[in-house]
Amino acid sequence: MRTLLWKDYHQNRKVLAAIAIFILLPYLIHVTAGLLLRSSSTQVSLASLFWLASTTAFYMSVVAASFVAGNAIAGERADRSAEFAAYLPISRRHAVASKIIVAIGGCLFFLIVNYGVHQLAGLAQGFGSFDPLSESLWLSLTTAVLMFGVPWLFSSLSSSSVIAAASGVVAFLLVMGICSSGLDSSRRATADAWAMVYMVTCLIAGIGGFVIGIVYYLRRVEP
């Protein structure tokens, strides 16, 4: 199993590295802007800069779930390493378990690190109960489930990581559109009701896509 984990990490390392660099950009931008403001005699605390940067980075981590899941299986087919792995004495269950651990582990790493930085920066700055990110945390996490599960399904079906990753963004836009149209058609609907419908829809589509993708991968004859 350790060999499989290393193989899947090696396959996904470029995607994970690109995401890490992409997520670091808000920190670089905010810190640079803060230093420029300080030079113009405007007082901006480092904690507040990290608080703002981590908020953006956290939402970017949610979107990044599409790219991690989209490359999890399709990336192996794109570089033809799946054909080589098919001849090895490896069970499909162990293979998919390794991919799940690497993909979900990568997504959780980005989410947890940025949320942790956000909380620490908020405490250092003394924002107290004012935390829009925490208030919308469940919305963000269910969105991450959607943007992971749907690309995972498409990744198991195709050999294009780009198409698989794009399916997560499309799924998000579709769910947003459907839920918003339902809200517009019902004047009695409240923001809480909309949020509940949205989260349930994300969970059903995300978990459903994830499970179907696993089943299809296990039963697929071709690599």
Image: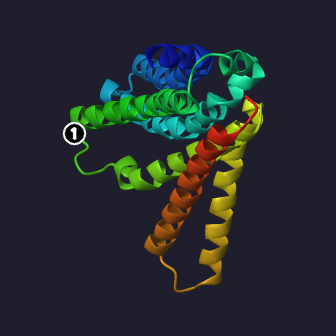
Seen at 53% across and 33% down, the residue is 93
Mark 1 Cα shell of 10 Å, populated few (<14), some (14-19), many (≥20): few
Dividing the picture into quadrants, the one containing residue 65 is top right
In this orientation, which residue lies closer to the viewer: 105 or 208? 208
Seen at 66% across and 34% down, the residue is 70
Give the secondary structure at mark 1: loop
Image: 145 above or below 21: below
Location of mark 1 (residue): 126
Seen at 52% across and 81% down, the residue is 189
* Farthest-out residue, front: 89
In this orientation, which residue lies closer to the viewer: 57 or 156? 156
Quadrant of the frame with the N terminus: top left
* Count of numbered badges drawn on the protein: 1
Dividing the picture into quadrants, the one containing residue 219 is top right
Q: In the image, residue 79 lies at what x, y percent? A: 75, 17
Q: Amino acid at mark 1?
A: Gly
- Could one spot residue 63 in this view of the protein? yes
Image: 222 above or below 182: above
Q: In the image, residue 203 lies at what x, y percent? A: 51, 57
Seen at 70% across and 16% down, the residue is 81
Image: 31 above or below 212: above
Q: Is residue 129 left or right of residue 78?
A: left
Q: In the image, residue 111 lies at what x, y percent? A: 43, 35
